[in-house]
Structures are given as structure tokens and as C-alpha cells.
Image (cartoon, coloured by chain):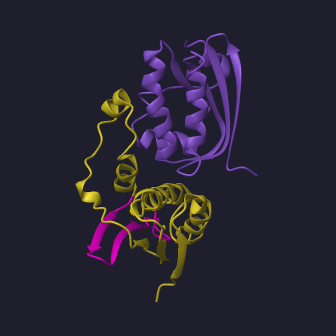
Amino acid sequence: MPELNIQTKPLRDDAYLFTLEGFLDAHTFEQLDETIQSIFEKNVFNIVADMTGVEYISSAGAGVFIGSLSVAQEGGGNIVLVNPTENVREVFDLLGLSQIFMIEPDIDAALAKF
Amino acid sequence: MAESVHKELVAPSDTRHLVRIREIVRDVASHCLETSCVNRVILAVDEAVANVMEHAYEEEPEPGDIRIALMADDNRFEIVITDTGREFNPQTIEVPDMAEHVKQGRRNGLGLFLMRQIMDEVSYTFVQGLRNELRMVKYARKPIEGGQ
């Protein structure tokens, strides 16, 4: 089983859904980083990240979202996190990121933020 | 006399071993800490070990090993992480301003911030030419048995 599984699909012309499963840590973060960059290269800057299946996140994983948020916003978009598990939510709380990122319960609610 | 658990392992400096190390930390820390606390301690250790894996040996042709000694008794969980790479003193890293971090898209310094937030003690020793040693402690705060 891969340690991080990433699936992407367009939700609208200007928004992509990322469905993440597994561990988002110092070993796997580059995988997510490269995938987000590839979406930015399509000139799509709205990203919905479904975190339901993320069992673990470290600062390396959170750092991908930190590094991408300003790029998304400069492109006129945003990053919205959907349904993080309690463990993942706690890491965002510890880092003070819960006030910075939009966190929504489902994909429709996330899309409504763009 | 309090029962204690000791475990020691040597891992190559390679992030693919982080999953296994987190499992070992869970196993030992569960001896004295509650589940939510164990999860935070796993994060702190993961951050410390990942720091070593990413930076300690980056100037050397061959990455070295990381030695990890874990101990838990009724009162505390303690871990000592040792490497023979370049000096890294966490005391020199400032607490990040997260809003500024996000604004600038910066990612560094977050691991140490988490380690300090989660663990009760974080101390560092550098022995020139020999090793870096990071010691972290988390105290158990279990309710007193039979207490109200």
C-alpha cells in the first residue's frame, strides 16, 4: 500500500478536488507538493483538499499547504480543507493554521467558498 | 518499584523509516500516556527524527544512522535521539510567526515549534566531532487511582 495516495479531478473549470489518503509526512510531502504545482501550471488556483482519509500529518505535510496558499491566493484562488480527522485538525490547531485555512465539512461547502 | 519499558533502535537516515519509528513510539509511549497525548508525542518525535534525516547528513557523501533510545515508566516517556551528523542546535531557531510564515510561503522551523509545544522538556547536547543528542521528555498526568 502506498504511504500517500493522491487522486485529483476537476470540480469546475477553475477548481480541482484533491482526495488524499494515508500519511502526509516528511517522506511523502513532495508527492503532494508536485501534484499541487502541476495544477497551478494549468492556471487553476482553487483547490479543495479532501482530508477524510489522511491518517497522519506532520509539519512537512502542513508545510505544503502553507507554501501553496500564497501562490493560490496570488493566482486569485484559495485552498479549502475538507473534513480533516481529529488528529489532523489538532496539528493545524497546534500550528495556529486553523485560523488561516478555511476548513469545511464537505466538498459542496468548500466549493461555495470560491 | 515502577515497571518500565525500554527500547533502542538504529535506523538509517532515510525518511522511508518514519512510519516504523512512529509505530515504535506509539508502542512505548502508550505504556504511560493517554491516547491523545501519545498521538502528540508521536508527532514531536517524528518532527525531531525527520529533522535529522533531512539535515544532519546532507553535506556528507553517505548518510549515517540515527540511534533512538526510548523509555517509559509510570511517570514519564523519554526519548534520546542521537546522530553523528553536523551540529544542529534547536535553541537557535526562533518561534515562527505563523501569519508571516504563510504570507511568505515559508515551511521551515515548524517541527521544532511543535516539539517545544508538545513535550515537557527538550534539551540538546552537541559533542564536537562525535554526536548530536536530542532528549525529550513527556510526563504522564494520570488521575490518582481512587481519587475523587
Give the residues in magenta.
B119-148
The image shows residue B110 at horizontal and vertical percentages of 38, 46
Horizontal side, residue B78 vs residue B95: left or right: right
Tell whether A5 sits left or right of B122: right
| Number of marks drawn | 0
- Colour given to chain A in the rendered image: purple
Q: Position of residue B79 (x, y in %)?
A: 43, 71
Q: Quadrant of residue A106?
A: top right
Residue at the spot 41% in from the left edge and 73% down from the top edge: B82
Instruction: In this rendered view, identify the residue nearer to me: B146 or B74.
Output: B74
Residue shown at 53% from the left, 54% from the top: B36
Q: Is residue B125 magenta?
A: yes
Residue B60 position within the rendered picture, expressed as x and y whole percent measured from the top left:
41, 65
- Give B117 or A33, whichever is nearer the viewer: A33
Q: B71 or A75: nearer the eye?
A: A75
| Depicted A86 relative to depicted A107: above or below | below
Q: Residue at x 72, y 49 (%)?
A: A2
Task: Answer left or right for B58 relative to B32.
Answer: left
Q: Nearer the viewer, residue B138 or A26?
A: A26
Q: Is residue A32 above or below residue B38?
A: above
- Asked if the magenta segment contains residue A35, the reply would be no
Q: Residue at x 39, y 73 (%)?
A: B84
Q: Quadrant of residue B100?
A: top left
Residue with the most extreme right position? A1
Compared with B45, A106 (above or below) is: above
Q: Quadrant of residue B76?
A: bottom left
- The tint of chain B in the picture is yellow
**Is A67 located above or below residue A87 in the figure?**
above
Residue A10 locus on image (x, y percent): 70, 18
Residue at far bottom of view = B1
